[in-house]
């Protein structure tokens, strides 16, 4: 069956995914109206459905349109706001036609009078219930002398959820060292704005929301979820209308108050704001997103992520050739596969006060460059990785002294320093050219396998003196970052990248489309990590979640925890080690070696399997294999997602378990005695 179908008499479109349908219709005034998003329907059934009549009534707030505009009796949240050169606002659509290209629908609209065109894009996939939506805005003028159109807001899409379900919102809040804390809250009868005004997707909220009727659980219930693939400022506005209009969620890049000009002949592509409907609760919703990210977002989903050692927590700024060599030797002996030197290897970067922008090895610390260390790491049979923060400069740097105009700044305004650093304007092509050139040389010179791309501060005084349309840089900075990373990957196909932003300040689908994993938090305390990882896992898959084992007491929290517990919590993602191995005892090193070996055995299941969040446990299943990582206390733990007729054998003990029993009465878990007991159970289907 075709994934996109069209009924010409009623002007109704139907998108079909494996388990859901999405329908829209061109209304009497040519505006595209939402019709259905939920359980599967035929085209004939979709055609028979009514459209919401919000636009003709001055009493309704939400219009139920696919892209709410300003104009007519529309009083809800506009997804598109423009101002023309003569001062007029509003949009009056003319439906120009459509293209259906396999799994894609492009719906062409044009303003009745002004030179503004808009194409709404929809894409569905055979292996996913995610519907991808975005739009292209085009100025139809052909002469440069024509006036631009001012864009006050341009969201990627507006989603409508059946009103009865629009009562509860799930999302994350957070902060530095406390990212992705899951919250579920009843939606008020009002507009609820989720946003980042920082120029990065942010620690404080992640660009997604889920909507349910308040009755969904981890295992069951209808959940509508929407995720924005964007790494800069963003805004998602949910609107619960007390008059019975549809619950709407409009979202896109940029925060409130930014305006920019669409020039004659110019096209503007929004990021994708993707949506998924699931009948399988929050767990099924997350697994749907994990599959989608693996199949349609990540550049190299197929590869197993290596076991990393990162020296940041061990050495801080005190980076020396000898110190790194000693750590590399110990890391290799544990079974580490990739050794990463973090901040402090370059320029005069002996603290956070200087050196950002001067991307050459510190001559005192590495008098012969990085070559000797790279050779040593390779001799130890590990790959070599390096930390960079290309978007930043310290005022105390040769780069800033030479190019003070390259940073974001405004005339007569202070240049606010955060962590003693300023943001380079990646909307400037001379800046992105400079960044690509040094990164290309660095990666090429040492055949670097892995970069940790960090970004440690928000944008402030985001101006570009002399540029008449400077507010574009809020989005063009992000596009500049994307362009440099994309070009770098093309130039160095073997290069792998970890996205990072002072921990998890830029963990989103935009970065994941061009990176391999994410550093989700600077907080490496295993107790705290459980909540952070839980929030991250709502959308993003385990294979992208970098998780290190560090020292105890934990440097951030001072909390003392057992080594096995720290490992087990980190083993639910892409395992790394970040502790000061020079201080680990022989017994700790031996235990760590065994745990790394265990991780390598379970890694294909954890990284490529389906994840089920259980109470104080995470279960991963791939093919015949099941891995359960559990903490807390001895108990029977009910497993999920197994075929009830199957029989599973415990790899360690040989004990047989009927899946029917595992699903109902649970897996008997025998945790060791002592502080924070934890365990890993491996089962294989007989
Ligand atoms: C913030 C990152 O999250 C840390 O892991 C570390 O790389 C520091 N930056 C280095 O400055």
Image (cartoon, helix red, strand yellow):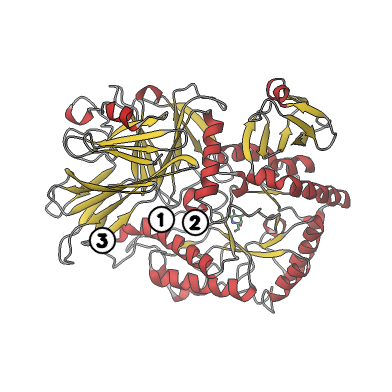
Residue, x 57% and y 56% (percent of image)?
300
Which of the marked residues, 3 or 1, is nearer the chain's N terminus?
3
> Can you give x and y, in whole percent of width and height, for residue 412 in the image?
32, 62
* Residue 669 visible, this angle: no
Q: Which residue is mark 1?
A: 460
* Residue 432 visible, this angle: yes
Residue, x 38% and y 67% (percent of image)?
428
Residue, x 72% and y 49% (percent of image)?
550
Task: Tell me if mark 2 has few (under 14), some (14-19) or many (20+) residues whose alpha carbon lies within 10 angstroms of its own.
Answer: some
Which of the marked residues, 2 or 3, is nearer the chain's N terminus?
3
Q: What is the spatial separation of the Cα atoms under label 2 and label 3, in whole angstroms?
A: 35 Å
Mark 2 falls on what kind of element?
Answer: loop
Q: What is the spatial separation of the Cα atoms under label 1 and label 2, in whole angstroms?
A: 9 Å
Quadrant into which the C terminus falls: top right
Residue behind label 3 places its C-beta within 8 angstroms of ligand 1: no
Q: Residue furthest right?
A: 586
Task: Tell me if mark 1 has few (under 14), some (14-19) or many (20+) residues whose alpha carbon lies within 10 angstroms of its own.
Answer: some
Mark 3 falls on what kind of element?
Answer: loop
Contact, mark 1 vs mark 2 (Cβ under 8 Å): yes
Q: Nearer the viewer, residue 371 or 297?
A: 297
For residue 373, above or below residue 10 = below
Which of the marked residues, 1 or 2, is nearer the chain's N terminus?
2
> Can you give x and y, in whole percent of width and height, for residue 95 in the image?
20, 44
Quadrant into which the N terminus falls: top left
Q: Which mark is residue 331?
A: none
Q: Nearer the viewer, residue 611 or 538?
A: 611
Q: Which residue is mark 2?
A: 418
Mark 1 falls on what kind of element?
Answer: loop
Q: Which residue is mark 3?
A: 266
Residue behind label 2 places its C-beta within 8 angstroms of ligand 1: no
Task: Tell me if mark 3 has few (under 14), some (14-19) or many (20+) residues whose alpha carbon lies within 10 angstroms of its own.
Answer: some
């Amino acid at each position: 069956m075709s994934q996109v179908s069209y009924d010409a008499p009623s002007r109704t479109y139907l998108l079909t995914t494996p388990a859901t349908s999405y329908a829209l219709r061109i209304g009497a005034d040519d505006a595209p109206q939402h019709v259905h998003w939920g359980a599967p329907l035929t085209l004939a059934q979709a055609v028979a459905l009514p459209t919401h009549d919000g636009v003709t009534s001055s009493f309704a707030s939400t219009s139920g349109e696919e892209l709410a505009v300003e104009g007519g009796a529309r009083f809800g949240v506009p997804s598109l706001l423009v101002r023309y050169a003569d001062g007029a606002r509003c949009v009056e659509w003319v439906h120009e036609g459509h293209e259906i290209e396999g799994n894609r629908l492009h719906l062409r609209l044009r303003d009745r009078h002004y030179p503004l065109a808009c194409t709404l894009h929809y894409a569905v996939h055979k292996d996913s219930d995610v519907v991808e939506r975005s739009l292209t805005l085009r100025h139809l003028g052909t002469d440069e002398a024509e006036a631009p159109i001012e864009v006050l807001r341009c969201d990627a899409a507006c989603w409508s959820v059946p009103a009865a379900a629009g009562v509860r919102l799930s999302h994350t809040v957070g902060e530095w060292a406390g990212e992705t804390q899951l919250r579920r809250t009843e939606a008020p009868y009002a507009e609820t704005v989720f946003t980042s005004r920082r120029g990065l997707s942010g620690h404080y909220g992640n660009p997604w929301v889920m909507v349910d009727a308040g009755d969904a659980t981890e295992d069951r219930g209808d959940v509508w979820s929407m995720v924005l693939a964007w790494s800069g400022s963003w805004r998602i506005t949910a609107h619960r209308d007390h008059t019975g209009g549809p619950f709407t969620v409009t979202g896109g890049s940029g925060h409130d108050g930014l305006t920019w000009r669409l020039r004659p002949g110019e096209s503007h592509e929004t990021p994708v704001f993707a949506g998924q409907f699931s009948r399988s609760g929050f767990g099924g919703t997350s697994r749907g997103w994990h599959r989608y990210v693996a199949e349609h977002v990540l550049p190299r989903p197929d590869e197993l992520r290596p076991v990393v050692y990162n020296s940041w927590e061990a050495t801080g700024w005190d980076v020396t050739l000898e110190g790194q060599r000693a750590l590399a030797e110990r890391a290799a002996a544990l079974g580490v596969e990739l050794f990463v030197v973090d901040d402090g290897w370059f320029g005069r970067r002996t603290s956070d006060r200087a050196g950002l922008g001067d991307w050459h090895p510190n001559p005192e610390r590495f008098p012969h460059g990085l070559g000797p260390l790279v050779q040593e790491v390779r001799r130890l049979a590990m790959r070599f990785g390096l930390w960079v923060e290309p978007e930043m400069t310290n005022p105390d740097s040769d780069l800033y002294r030479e190019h003070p105009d390259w940073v974001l700044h405004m005339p007569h305004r202070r240049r606010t320093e955060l962590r003693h650093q300023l943001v380079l304007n990646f909307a400037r092509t001379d800046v992105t050219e400079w960044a690509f050139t040094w990164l290309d040389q660095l990666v090429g010179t040492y055949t670097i396998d892995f970069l940790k791309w960090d970004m440690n501060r928000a944008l402030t005084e985001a101006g570009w003196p002399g540029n008449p349309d400077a507010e574009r840089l809020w989005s063009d900075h992000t596009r500049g970052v994307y362009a440099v990373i994309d070009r770098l990957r093309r130039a160095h196909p073997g290069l792998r990248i970890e996205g990072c932003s002072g921990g998890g300040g830029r963990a989103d689908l935009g970065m994941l489309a061009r990176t391999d994993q994410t550093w989700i938090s600077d907080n490496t305390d295993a107790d705290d990590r459980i909540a952070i990882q839980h929030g991250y896992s709502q959308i993003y898959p385990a294979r992208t979640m970098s998780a290190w084992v560090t020292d105890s007491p934990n440097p951030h929290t001072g909390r003392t925890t057992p080594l096995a517990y720290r490992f087990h919590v980190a083993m639910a993602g892409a395992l790394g080690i970040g502790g000061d191995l020079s201080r680990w005892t022989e017994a700790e090193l031996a235990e760590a070696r065994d745990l790394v070996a265990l991780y390598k055995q379970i890694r294909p299941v954890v990284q490529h399997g389906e994840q089920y969040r259980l109470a104080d446990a995470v279960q991963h299943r791939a093919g015949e294999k099941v891995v359960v990582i559990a903490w807390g206390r001895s108990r029977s733990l009910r497993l999920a997602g197994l075929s009830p007729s199957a029989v599973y054998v415990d790899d360690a003990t040989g004990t047989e378990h009927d899946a029917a029993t595992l699903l109902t009465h649970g897996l008997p878990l025998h945790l060791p005695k002592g502080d924070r007991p934890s365990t890993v159970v491996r089962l294989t289907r007989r």
